Structure formats: structure tokens, C-alpha cells
Amino acid sequence: MDQSARTFKAAIFDMDGLILDSERTVLNIWEKIGEKYGFENIRAYGISVIGKNKKATIDEFERVYGESGVPYEKELRAVYNEMAQKGEVPLKPNTLELLNAMKSASMKIAIASSSTREEITSQLGPLGALELFDAIVSGDQVTRSKPDPEIFLKACDALNVKPEESLGLEDSYNGVRSCKASGLYTIMVPDLIAPNDEMKELADIILPSLKDVQAFLNLK
């Protein structure tokens, strides 16, 4: 059967870089922190932690720079949250159209994001997207960061669906690894990082935008 004609009971979304245009903002803030405190190649570090939760981000900072990442991660989040509250971190194009089309098709929808629950609700709430989700599983609700599949499996449990009945949408390498390992049909919608050979092998399909996802799924 053509996968575009396949019926899924649920869709599980990452947030940052997929439905929220946040990763460019985060990288810009990391670059300012690097310049301020003299950390070299911090953009490469920022790209390396895309898709990871807070703890994994801090641990990687310490591994790369040899000192605790706690104060710098806190500084980044403070700057970013202030921008988000001002509405300066918008939704990706066609986000609301896709979510509403899924709701019209009686699909259950969840978020599986490495961000904290507070960050998810505070950032998506003002943008009119939060109420469209049936469940939220955040980075502070799991013990193992992406690429471990724990967060997607918890989201399936929250929606009361099986992984094989569901699709997952991700933009990052670790997110795709996590999603695929959980057994979901995996759609990659790349953001800052182009898919490499591993991603082309892991993802069931790679699509350039959420609008293309909606068309692929034949959702009106």
C-alpha cells in the first residue's frame, strides 16, 4: 500500500525546529554566549545538542569545554524565554493547518519534546497551538534523552496507541533515531541540518515542509 494512503491513529511531534522555528534563535544565542565568555566553536556545539534535553545539553558542554554548562544553559534559556514570551519565536509555516487537518481526520496528536513542560506550554500557548495536542511528553518526564526511544514510547502510552499505529515527525538526527527506534513510521522534516546517509536510511520518508507532510498524508 502507498504509505500516503495509510491510516494512522496518531501523530507525535517534536517541537523545536519542527513546529517551532526555534533552533536558529538558540544557535544565535549560543554564539553570543560563546563570544561573551570566550568559548570557541560554540556554534558546532549548539548544533551537536539539537534534539537533546537539558541534562544532556549541560553534560555535553562540560565534555567539550571542561567546565559546568549549568550557568550558560540557564543564561541561554533566560534570553530565549524572554524572546518567546514576546512572540519572537514563531511557528513554522503550515503548523496550524496540519494540526487542524489531523484533528479533522480524528487523529490523536502529542508532543514529544526534549524541552521542559513549562517551556512547551509557555511557548506554544500564545501561538494558538497548545490546545490542539491531546498529550505532552517533555524532556523532564523521561530519564533517557533522545536518541533513546523512551520519549516516543511514553507519548504512545499517553495517547493509548501502539507505535506501529502511529507516525512521528522529527527534524534532528537524534530525534529521527529516537523515533525510528520506538517503532513509529518516521517522517523527517529537516531544519538546520540536512539529512545525511544515516538519516536517509532511518527515516521512512524525508519531506521538505509541514505542508508537504499534509499533502503526503492526503489530509484536507
Image (spheres, rainbow, N blue to C red):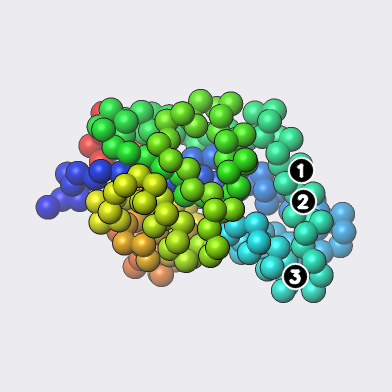
Is any atom of residue 169 visible in this view? no
Is 118 placed above or below 56 here?
A: above
Name the amino acid type tagged 2: Lys
Q: Position of residue 37 (x, y in %)?
A: 87, 59
Marking on residue 74: 2
Q: How many angstroms separate mark 3 from mark 1 (CA)?
A: 20 Å
Q: Position of residue 2 (x, y in %)?
A: 15, 50
Tag 3 residue? 62
Q: Quadrant of residue 8?
A: top left
Tag 1 residue? 78
Residues tagged 2 and 1 counted as in contact (Cβ below 8 A): yes
Local crowd at mark 3 within 10 Å, few (<14), some, or many (≥20)? some
Looking at the figure, which quarter contains the C terminus? top left
Q: How many angstroms separate mark 2 from mark 1 (CA)?
A: 6 Å
In this picture, residue 60 sits left or right of residue 16: right
* SS of the residue under disc 3: helix
Residues tagged 3 and 1 counted as in contact (Cβ below 8 A): no
